[in-house]
Amino acid sequence: MKVLLSRDDIQARVAEMGKEIARDYAGREPHLVGVLKGACTFMTDLARQIDLPLTLDYIAVSSYGA
């Protein structure tokens, strides 16, 4: 079963996550870390929804295989 989420659904969930993080980390400064490739837009949207001072970092990962 394929479930499609609308832009509004995604924005609403990101806003909800931001509020949850702000509540859970009240009085602290959260540090968000995302995987560099692909996380930038999401992390920016999420950070905007967190009403706390915070810092952001990105990490690059590589896969070495056959």
Image (spheres, rainbow, N blue to C red):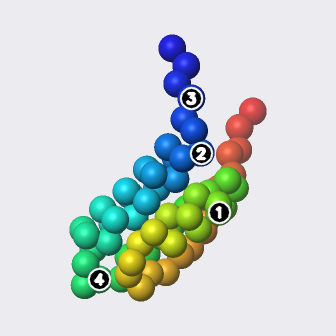
Which amino acid does the dot numbered 1 rest on? Cys
Instruction: Work out how far the residue at label 1 is from the one at label 3, CA to CA, in angstroms.
Output: 22 Å
Residue depth check, mark 4 versus mark 3: number of the one nearer the observer: 3
The image shows residue 41 at horizontal and vertical percentages of 64, 60
Quadrant containing the C terminus in the rendered view: top right
Q: Is residue 66 left or right of residue 47?
A: right
Report the residue at 44% width, 81% height from top.
54
> Disc 4 marks which amino acid?
Arg
Q: Label 4 vs label 3: CA separation? A: 35 Å
State the image quarter where residue 18 is shown.
bottom left
Which of the two discs, 4 and 2, labels the residue nearer the N terminus?
2
| Horizontal and vertical percent position of residue 35 | 60, 58
Quarter of image, res 36: bottom right
Q: Secondary structure under badge 3?
A: loop
**Which residue, given by chain and number where applicable, does mark 1 sit on?**
40
Can you tell which mark lies on residue 4? Answer: 3
Q: CA distance from mark 4 to mark 2?
A: 30 Å
* Residue kind at label 3, given as amino acid type: Leu
Pair 4/2: label in front: 2
Quadrant for residue 7, please give it: top right
Q: Residue 48 — which label?
A: none
Mark 1 neighbour class, 10 Å CA radius: few under 14, some 14 to 19, many 20 or more: some
**Residues at discs 2 and 1 in contact (Cβ within 8 Å):** no
Circles 4 and 1: CB distance less than 8 Å? no
Q: Residue furthest front?
A: 8
Of all residues shown, which one is farthest toward the right?
Answer: 66
Instruction: Determine the secondary structure under disc 2.
Output: helix
Label 2 belongs to which residue?
A: 7
